Amino acid sequence: MKKRLDVVVTLVVFVFLALYALWFTSETATNLLKGDDWRFLLSFYKKWVEGSLHLRDWFSDHHPIAWHPLVYIFNAEYFSLQRIYGAWLGFLLKTITGALLLWKMYDGVAPPVSKLLAVLFPLYVVLLFFGMNETAEYSWPLLGYVSSMSFFCGLVVLIVLDSILRAGRISLYKAAVFAFIVALSLLLMGTLMKLFLIASLLVLVMVSIAERKVSIREGMPFFIICLVLAFHNLFMRSLEISNSKSYPITFANIAELASNSFNTVQVVAYGLASGISSRAIFHYPSVAVDVLAIACLVIVAYSVVVFFQERLWQTTIIPIVLVMYLLLTFLGAIVYRAEAMGPDVWPMYVPRYFPTYHMGWIGVVWIYYFKLRLVSKRSIVLGAAALLSFGICMMLLGLVNAWRTKPHIEAANLKAEIAVCQYANGDLTTVDAIPFYIRGHYFSQVGVQLLKEKKLNIFSDNAMGYRCADLPGKQTSHSESSH
């Protein structure tokens, strides 16, 4: 069997970037609790050790998901809350998800006529997937294993949904498997998975409209998703848990968005542009950045048109669901955080959104990959190649910049770890030496003392990295830190 150059190149780059991501994660992922970890330490783990944990507590965090509590408790019970294990778990899930994405992208699709585009398209997809234009996904274990699990669950659901839509007949067994996977994913990932399901529902409706008929292939999964969503909502209500603890949606918020529609569009456009370039564009708005942002908005919007014009749902619906998921994320962040919007505050600036930006852009690139694979006209091929090359260069710059910032991240982590150890020993003035992105809003003396009492995290004798036992002036059985 003749080997395809595009597949070989893609696999080589995928393996290289996976190893690069593993190295970067291992070096920069702080073992110390970070951000929302401190809140969860008191709101969940403290109840666990006291024996006062109830079922509703598993879903009462900022986003009602069960996955984070499961990982947190398992980590605390068996690995003394070493957060680096969570970072490695996130990497593993991310790598598996990436392999599944590439498999679906190549599944049953002939390579593009242009050998240049055949290489550039999947190469850009892999670079987007392991994108490091924002590195919080790799250096913050919580974000890593939560975002990776949400995309893994979402992709598994979409793969099964894809098989249902492409099947000649639908069996009861396949319907039951689909319902189980949807229910389990929703239970584990909550609101994050709900966005995937709503995006899938919207796409199913749009496909039915495009086909001008409602077949059982679209109707059955639509009914199953709606039914599971309804039962999940009833379950949350039975636990007296609201679906979101973000800013409430009010008519005032919506009116503000409508009256300031230009700013809303600008937020979306800048968010899209930052996903393929850098978060720094929010700091340096200019005519060039505005042009890039508008171009990104047009490219994404036209990808939706292309998908339905080319009837690409007959091949797969995964890319369009990824695009709709991205747009729903924008909508949710803007509406729920409308009160935070202003000339100097961008709802889409937050680092945790960047994995979603990358997945959404993968959907966009995937659609154009289908659109252009039969095109051989020189001008179109060169134009597409130029755009892809620009995107590839931006992602490569992100990888280089991540390598350059690694020592600074490591230094900041070590400084924070030492400061927390000193804080635990009674020097409360060291709290100012802990960066805000690490201590967040919920860092407290109670939380630090709980870690110290239970010998968890950096207070463990087997800590992965800096140990409080190695604090200068303290006796330790080890002569050096393992950091």
Image (tube, grey):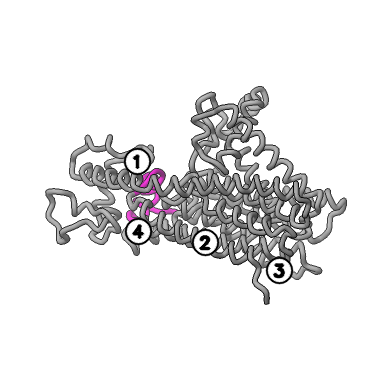
Query: Type of residue at label 3?
Result: Lys
Q: Which numbered disc flags the more N-terminal residue, 4 or 3?
A: 4
Secondary structure, mark 1, is helix
Q: Which mark is residue 174?
A: 3
Q: Which numbered disc flags the more N-terminal residue, 4 or 1?
A: 4
Secondary structure, mark 4, is helix
Q: Which numbered disc flags the more N-terminal residue, 3 or 2?
A: 2
Relative placement, left or right, of 144 versus 468 is: right
The residue tagged 2 is 95
Position of the C terminus by quadrant: bottom left
The residue tagged 4 is 76
Query: Type of residue at label 4?
Result: Ala
Within 10 Å of disc 2 (Cα), the crowding (few <14, some 14-19, many 20+) is many
| Mark 1 vs 3: CB contact within 8 A | no
| Mark 3 vs 2: CB contact within 8 A | no
Q: Is residue 124 magenta?
A: no
State the CA–CA distance, disc 4 to disc 1: 19 Å
State the CA–CA distance, disc 3 to disc 2: 27 Å
State the CA–CA distance, disc 2 to disc 1: 29 Å
Q: Which mark is residue 439?
A: 1
